[in-house]
Amino acid sequence: MSLKLLKAAAETENTDDFHLGRLLVLVRGVDLRKKSAATKAKAVEGITKLAKLDFLLRYPTCLERALRHEQKDPKQAEVVPRERTSIESKMIRFRYGPWDARYRRWLGLLVARGLIRVGLEGHTVQIGLTDAGRELADQFRANELYADQTRRSDVIAKAFGAFSATRLKDFVYQVIPEITDMKWGEEITADDV
């Protein structure tokens, strides 16, 4: 792999807008499954849950494994060969698992742009799209560049959207137990998953 390609991948990973678009597509996938305005206002219950759902979106080989564990067709993840070996298929073990530490920042940016609403219900942060957020998410979802993320977001919302944050966290650790034994900063590759 060329150094130029590695630099481009690193730059993309550090660009907030890349992640914001993906999160809008994901939250819209959950939002579309909600039945009323009240439940859509809190499409995702908790930052922890958002991080776990996004983990499955970012790492399709893990989504494939999770679907298989739930006795659902893993082909729904539609993982292509390049995704099994690409630099994006690798993840890093963070403090609380392979979850990115930037979710609060990304949520703040989405709130500041008027694309999501964040509220507190009890001790749980409720994350819901605004009308402008739905409109932009729908534009992303209609764009061919977001086709894989859109399709997978819908699969994730259907298969795991009803899980509580705790159940989802425990589920991921059950399905991918090797993450719990890794050291912080250690890379998890698609071969491990």
Image (tube, rainbow, N blue to C red):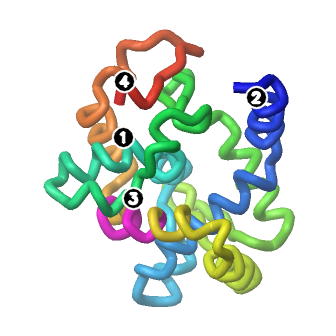
Q: Label 4: state its secondary structure.
A: loop
Q: Are marks 3 and 4 in contact (CB under 8 Å)?
A: no
Residue at the spot 41% in from the left edge and 52% down from the top edge: 79
Q: Tell whether position 38 is magenta.
A: no
- Start-end of magenta stretch: 153-160
Pointer 2: residues within 10 angstroms few (<14), some, or many (20+)?
A: few
Which numbered disc, 2 or 4, marks the residue closer to the eye? 2
Which numbered disc, 3 or 4, marks the residue closer to the eye? 3
* Residue, disc 1: 169
Which numbered disc, 4 or 1, marks the residue closer to the eye? 4
Q: Label 1: state its secondary structure.
A: helix
Q: Specify whether residue 99 is in view.
A: no
* Residue, disc 3: 78
Give how far apart the Cα atoms at labels 3 and 2 are.
25 Å
Pointer 3: residues within 10 angstroms few (<14), some, or many (20+)?
A: some
Q: What type of secondary structure mainly makes up the magenta span?
A: helix
* Residue, disc 4: 192
First reached walking from the N terminus: tag 1 or tag 3: 3
* Residue, disc 2: 6
Tally the marks: 4
